[in-house]
Image (cartoon, grey):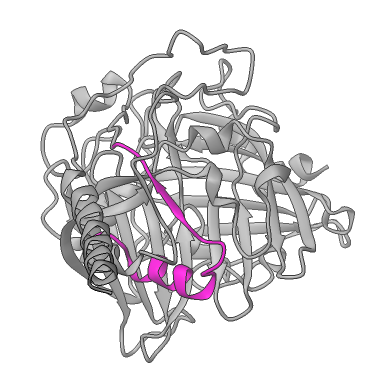
């Protein structure tokens, strides 16, 4: 009997030691930007070979041990994923690889902080730079995300999916063109962030339902301009409601307009608080996911976690709380921004009682032919309905997005008349 007790004691002790060893051995090293394509990259293919394919899993977090990491390394949304999907959700933890890069022109323009105006709704700075290389307040991090380098003249298409607990899937697809004005390669004398035209190409009932958005650098002085084209009436109309918590039909109520690309648009409905820079496990260097056919990782409840890679990342944590005199269906939001690339990597939304509503992930890779770091999709897990949505999906099995067209878009296309032509 004594031998049994001794064996159990050492078994328990060794399991705690293993957890402590894993936790203490996690390190965040120096930056090692990949600023040009790796040798195995083929520009004729929509493939980004994994520079870190030899990395092995350090350890895996699952229902048996997630509480050991909850306080220090996990976010509330990740903990809820373990609670709700305890039999299937897991996180493979890999070494941290700080590979993100931007074109050298962006770094050359970056010297000092830009200036916020109109209570944070506007920005004045060197166009094409990282606006706040030395952030000191919450909205600095939000603006760094919004104005991070994302290409110049852009064309591409991407699918979206809504997956139900019964395994049924709603599939949609769209096509978009855009001009990003916050970059070193385009003169921006119009005070614009960018212009975007998009259209739904699937399902057929929504085909050619199209949208034009013109976004300024000051949402107070020059609010967003938006128009929609309806294929049924063949008319273009102004759409001032496409902002804030407007929910597009295709999203089926899962995400709001200002959740596109993590966060976008005016910021005046929230009080913004910087909660500090913290070390958290984040979806990062998701090359394996990008190189996998989409239908292989679409499973009920959440994507197949075997294709995701989590790393210890320094993130700037921002809390957005609804102002008393404002309305929004998302009263509380917590956002986690990568300190290196300024991408939002995770967002969590909470109701009035601060009960978690949804968990969102934005796994990134370095598109090293540009170079720039962006997500391969946005995944939103809705806890009330147990559905999830993948949007802005970029993958080896869909056409490659062109981030810097050889022939720039004609700016005159981005008008209501141009929208009608684009829709057809």
Q: Position of residue 187 (x, y in %)?
A: 37, 28
Q: Is residue 318 visible?
A: no
Of the pair 401 and 304, the residue shown nearer to us: 304
Q: Residue at x 55, y 76 (%)?
A: 383
Q: Is residue 98 above or below residue 317?
A: above
The front one of 416 and 294 is 294
Side of 32 where 418 appears, left or right:
right
| Camera sees residue 240 | yes
Residue 59 covered by magenta stretch: no
Q: Position of residue 83 (x, y in %)?
A: 46, 75
Q: Nearer the viewer, residue 18 or 69?
A: 18
Q: Residue furthest top?
A: 39
Q: Inspect the magenta stretch and tell me whether residue 90 lies in it.
A: yes
Which quarter of the figure is the C terminus placed in?
top right
Q: Position of residue 313 (x, y in %)?
A: 26, 46
Residue under the point 58% across and 17% down? 407
The front one of 19 and 112 is: 19
Residue 11 as seen in the image, left or right of residue 386: left
State which quadrant residue 68 falls in.
bottom left
Which picture quadrant has residue 348?
bottom left
Q: Residue at x 57, y 13 (%)?
A: 43
Residue found at x 70% / y 62%: 163
Q: Which residues are magenta?
A: 73-95
Residue 216 image offset from top left, x and y in percent: 41, 51
Extreme residue in the front direction = 1
- Report the number of discs: 0
Looking at the figure, which quarter contains the N terminus? bottom left
């Amino acid at each position: 009997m004594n031998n049994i007790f001794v064996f159990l004691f050492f078994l328990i002790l060794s399991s705690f030691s293993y957890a402590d060893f894993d936790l203490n051995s996690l390190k965040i090293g120096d930056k090692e930007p990949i600023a040009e394509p790796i040798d195995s990259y083929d520009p004729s293919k929509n493939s980004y070979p994994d520079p870190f394919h030899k990395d092995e899993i350090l350890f895996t977090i699952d229902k048996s041990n997630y509480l050991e990491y909850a306080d220090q390394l996990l976010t509330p949304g990740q903990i809820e994923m373990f609670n709700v999907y305890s039999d299937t959700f897991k996180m493979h933890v890999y070494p941290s690889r700080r590979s993100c890069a931007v074109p050298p022109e962006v770094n050359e323009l970056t010297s000092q902080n830009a200036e916020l105006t109109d209570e944070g709704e506007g920005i004045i700075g060197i166009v094409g730079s990282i606006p706040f290389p030395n952030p000191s307040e919450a909205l600095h991090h939000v603006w760094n995300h919004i104005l991070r380098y994302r290409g110049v003249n852009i064309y591409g298409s991407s699918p979206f999916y809504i997956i139900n607990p019964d395994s049924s899937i709603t599939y949609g697809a769209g096509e978009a063109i855009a001009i990003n004005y916050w970059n070193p390669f385009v003169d921006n004398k119009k005070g614009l962030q960018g212009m975007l035209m998009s259209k739904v190409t699937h399902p057929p009932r929504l085909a050619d339902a199209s949208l034009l958005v013109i976004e300024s650098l000051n949402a107070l002085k020059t609010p967003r301009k938006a128009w929609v084209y309806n294929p049924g009436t063949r008319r273009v109309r102004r759409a001032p409601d496409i902002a804030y918590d407007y929910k597009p039909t295709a999203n089926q109520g899962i995400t709001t307009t200002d959740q596109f690309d993590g966060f976008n648009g005016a910021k005046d409905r929230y009080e913004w608080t910087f909660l500090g820079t913290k070390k958290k496990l984040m979806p990062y260097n998701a090359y394996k996911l990008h190189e996998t056919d989409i239908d292989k990782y679409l499973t009920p409840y959440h994507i197949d976690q075997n294709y995701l890679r989590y790393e210890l990342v320094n993130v700037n944590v921002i809390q957005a709380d609804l102002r008393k005199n404002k309305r929004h269906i998302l009263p509380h939001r917590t956002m986690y921004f990568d300190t290196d690339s300024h991408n939002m990597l995770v967002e969590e939304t909470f109701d009035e009682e601060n009960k978690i509503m949804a968990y969102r992930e934005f796994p990134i890779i370095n598109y090293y032919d540009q170079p720039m770091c962006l997500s391969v999709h946005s995944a939103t897990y809705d806890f009330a309905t147990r559905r999830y949505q993948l949007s802005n999906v970029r993958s080896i099995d869909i056409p490659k997005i062109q981030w810097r067209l050889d022939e720039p878009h004609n700016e005159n296309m981005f008008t209501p008349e141009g929208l009608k032509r684009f829709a057809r």
